[in-house]
């Protein structure tokens, strides 16, 4: 599948890993892909959604309790749990603040994994620096391929990845876009128009 990715689409995937690393997350979720898609403020995704990377990054940090280093991290599934708790009146951020007020800053931080070491034959046994994709994000990438096939295109561009995010419709990226009032139908139309123009 990755052989179909354009250079720009590959950059989105690589930069999503960089975004996850810069936020000290141990996974690459839909939120990191959205950040990467918004990296170019003049790109089709930023123009269509009206979002900017700084705003989305702040939303992500707010959802993980405001920690920028080694703090608790919400995966896509955790974001859904947090939304469910919020719906019944439980503010996860307030709970975290109360715990840290009583037990000290960083009380919720998990210990860092041991550094990865190379064995006798140079194999890395722990900590290669690779950050895995969440299952939801893997689905988004698969859906980007399906979107390209649906549009009868033999390549996958960043717009296809955004179409995959929209088609999957769940996860932290979708939640942030919905909360920010992004018109998802318009974005879908804009992405199709943009990628069809590129194919012409």
Image (cartoon, rainbow, N blue to C red):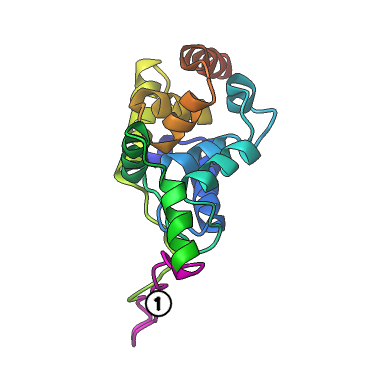
Neighbours of disc 1 within 10 Å: few (<14), some (14-19), many (20+): few
Please tell me whether mark 1 sits on a helix, a strand or a loop: loop
Above/below status of 116 relative to 102: below
Above/below status of 123 relative to 86: below
Q: Position of residue 7 (x, y in %)?
A: 55, 39
- In the image, farthest residue toward the bottom: 120
**Bounds of the magenta span?**
103-124
The answer to whether one can see residue 57 in this image is yes
In this view, the residue in front, 79 or 46, is: 79
For the C terminus, the image quarter is top right
User: Circle 1 sits on which residue?
Assistant: 116
For the point 51% across and 49% down, the residue is 14
For the point 36% across and 26% down, the residue is 169
41 sits to left or right of 32: right
Which quadrant of the figure has residue 55? top right
- Residue 140 within the segment the image draws in magenta: no
Dominant secondary structure (helix, strand or loop) of the stretch shown in magenta = loop
- Residue 115 within the segment the image draws in magenta: yes
Above/below status of 67 relative to 63: below
């Amino acid at each position: 599948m990755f052989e179909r990715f354009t250079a720009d689409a590959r950059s989105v995937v690589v930069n999503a890993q960089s975004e996850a690393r810069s936020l000290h997350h141990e996974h690459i979720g839909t939120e990191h892909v959205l950040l990467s898609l918004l990296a170019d403020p003049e790109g089709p995704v930023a123009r269509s959604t009206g979002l900017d990377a700084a705003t989305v990054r702040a939303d992500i940090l707010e959802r993980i309790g405001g920690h920028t280093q080694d703090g608790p991290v919400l995966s896509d599934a955790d974001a859904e749990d947090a939304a469910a708790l919020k719906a019944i009146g439980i503010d996860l951020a307030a709970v975290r603040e109360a715990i840290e007020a009583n037990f000290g800053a960083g009380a919720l931080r998990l210990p860092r994994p041991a550094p990865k070491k190379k064995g006798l034959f140079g194999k890395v046994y722990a900590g290669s620096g690779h950050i895995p994709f969440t299952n939801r994000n893997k689905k988004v990438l698969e859906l980007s391929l399906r979107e390209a096939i649906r549009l009868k295109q033999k390549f996958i561009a960043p717009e296809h990845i955004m179409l995959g995010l929209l088609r999957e419709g769940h996860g932290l990226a979708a939640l942030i876009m919905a909360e920010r009032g992004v018109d998802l139908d318009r974005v879908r139309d804009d992405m199709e128009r943009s990628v069809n123009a590129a194919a012409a």
